[in-house]
Image: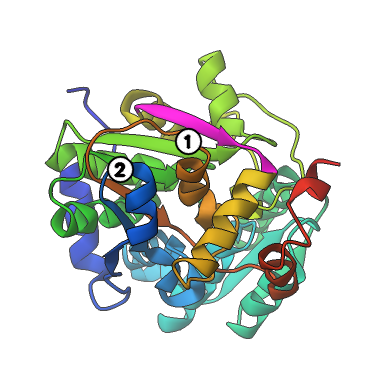
Amino acid sequence: MIEMPVTLQHIRAARERIAGKVERTPCVPSQSLSERAGHPVHLKLEHHQATGAFKLRGASNAIASLSPEEKSRGVVAASTGNHGRALAHAAKLDGMRAVICMSSLVPENKLDAIRRLGAEVRIVGNSQDDAQQEVDRLAAEEGLVMLPPFDHPDIVAGQGTIGLEIMEQVPDAASVLVPLSGGGLAAGVAAAVKGVSPGTKVIGISMARGAAMKSSLDAGRPLQVEELSTLADSLGGGIGLDNRLTFAMCRDLLDDVVLLAEDEIAAGIRHAYEQEREIVEGAGAVGIGALLAGKVKTSGPIVLILSGKNIDMSLHRRIVCGESSGRECAA
Ligand SMILES: *Cc1c(COP(=O)(O)O)cnc(C)c1O
């Protein structure tokens, strides 16, 4: 197997480091999805993680890996929401300063949550790239330590701890479906899953509107794509033209990448609520959406990662009432 920058060994070390700081989330069977798929389907409930998304794992691992001197300077990041929230939470636990920069596309509910966690919030521009420029400035001028949302070995290793848990909870998993944006989650989970069980398939799922990793994988190099509004807002944003880790890891480790239309994401959110009694955000529902749309062909047990629950509740209500099919995003 190809030598990876983040290995099973790093991921096991991350698990030791973040033990007691993050939840070991349940992985439960879904009767309705199992009947539909014709194979056992299990849901990894990462949206039950503190702060409502898996990103606390990477943030906790990255912060726990800082030197005392770095901790005294504080951390800064650009975030579409969940990474910022996770970093704010983890920094506060450690008594550290956290500054979170984000674009004006980020929904109000996510922004408020970060402020409530005690972090400073800066709204800059209309894209993740604009927010990143402010991060670079703060790192250069005020000495804050930059912790990016996905392209960092300690972040990838932290997210990978989900893969270790999955292989303990469903040892015969034939495939694992992972929401895919910058690829920190997919790279970490794939490294863990394939480290333990090389034959298990790992499939990334993105929205069709602005799927930066998929376009980049197809082109064979990191590409910039236009950022568009989507129900899966946590999957928005680019992978960075100077991507160091996650592009190569996703290229070498993922078996496939599947793209979903907005109404397929909405169907995933609706199914999660009505059949599984779970509130998930768009990004967290793409695994369910892909199965319901018949876009994933597998044989054997399937694990879906429900990655987050931080959705605006009035939007959630419109989706489950059938008043929103998600198509207005594509209008
Ligand atoms: C960040 C995020 C993702 C995607 O993770 P990447 O590491 O950027 O691929 C998926 N779901 C939710 C809820 C997220 O917050």
Question: Which structural element holds mark 1?
Answer: loop
Residue 201's spot in the image, x, y percent? 27, 33
Task: Check the image and name the residue furthest to the top.
Answer: 219
Q: Could you tell me residue 203's position as x and y percent?
A: 38, 35
Of label 2 and label 1, which has the lower sequence position? 2
Q: Residue furthest right?
A: 331
Eyeballing the image, is 291 above or below 101? above
Q: What residue do we see at 50% from left, 63% from top? A: 272
Disc 2 element: loop
Q: Kindly indicate the quadrant of the structure image that contains residue 322.
A: bottom right
Q: Residues within 10 Å of mark 2 (few under 14, many from 20)?
A: few
Tell me the magenta residue range: 255-262
| C-alpha distance separating marks 2 and 1 | 12 Å
Badge 1 amino acid: Gly
Pointer 1 residue:
294
Left or right: 196 as drawn, with respect to 151: left
- Who is closer to the viewer here, 66 or 42? 42
Residue 38 is labelled as 2
Q: Position of residue 224 (x, y in %)?
A: 67, 28
Residue located 73% across and 51% down the image = 326
The answer to if 256 sits in the magenta stretch is: yes
- Residue 299 part of the magenta-drawn span: no
Asked if residue 23 lies left or right of residue 228, the reply is left
